[in-house]
Image (tube, rainbow, N blue to C red):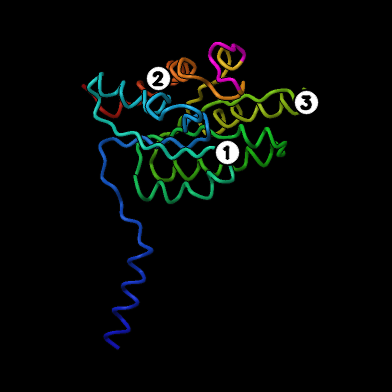
Amino acid sequence: MFLFKNKVLSILMLFTIPAVCLPCPVLVIGDSISAAYGLETTQGWVRLLQQKLKREKIDCEIINSSISGDTTGGGVARINQDLATYHPQVVIIALGGNDGLRGLPPRVIKKNLKTMIDRAQSSNSQVILLGIEIPPNYGKRYTDSFKAIYQELATETKIDLVPELMTGIGDRPRYMQEDGIHPNRTGQSLILEKIWPRLHRIMAEKIPD
């Protein structure tokens, strides 16, 4: 019986996710844009954010849980583990683009994003939602419905929204890689400029001078 208990304990330990203690953790859940696809990791906006925090002498650690090609369904599937592991004070959600490119129903995309927001808020994390745009491949009706998801969620859940993240970037070739989909190094820097004001305000509240 003693040996049996030890074996059971060993198996349970394999599946236990230890919490990671980090200063003011900020979790980013995104896709290829946040994963710096086609670039060195150091050139992506998430790593640039960590560098900016260091320069500003703000003691916060950025956890980049972004996966190229990921969808809102993938985000739902893994957000619980990320929340349990890192206990983030802020969660930045940057998903939906791949859903839109695949033509998933807007109601499904919205439901998945709402689930992620609810779970983050239930873990006492503040949420910043990044508004994603898609090309008009599926017509104006679909594009408008997709775009509306982000503002609707921000209003309904009372979270911060960075609207139209790629506006002024995605439509200018000098800020994009040759594929015309992913931002280049300059484009990544511009993304950070859009996100920074909202994130800095939240951090100022959490880490007062």
The residue nearer to you, when weighing 81 against 157, is 81
Residue at 26% from the left image edge and 40% from the top image edge: 22
Q: Label 3 vs label 2: CA separation?
A: 31 Å
Residue at 35% from the left image edge and 37% from the top image edge: 89
Tell me where residue 126 appears, x and y as whole percent.
41, 34
Q: Is there a contact, CB below 8 Å, between mark 1 and mark 2?
A: no
Which part of the image, by quadrant, shows the C terminus?
Answer: top left
SS at circle 2: helix
Which stretch is magenta? 171-178
The residue beneath circle 1 is: 69
The residue beneath circle 3 is: 141
Which part of the image, by quadrant, shows the N terminus?
Answer: bottom left
State whether residue 31 appears in this view: yes
Type of residue at label 1? Gly
The residue beneath circle 2 is: 196
Q: Is residue 98 above or below residue 205?
A: below
The prevailing secondary structure element of the residues shown in magenta is: loop
Q: Residues within 10 Å of mark 3 (few under 14, many from 20)?
A: few
SS at circle 3: helix
Q: Is there a contact, CB below 8 Å, between mark 3 and mark 2?
A: no
Residue 190 relative to residue 21: left or right? right
Label 3 vs 1, first from the N-terminus: 1
Q: Is residue 149 above or below residue 67?
A: above
Label 1 vs 2, first from the N-terminus: 1
Type of residue at label 2? Trp
Residue at 70% from the left image edge and 39% from the top image edge: 104
Type of residue at label 3? Arg
Q: Label 1 vs label 2: CA separation?
A: 24 Å
Label 3 vs 2, first from the N-terminus: 3
Residue at 50% from the left image edge and 40% from the top image edge: 67
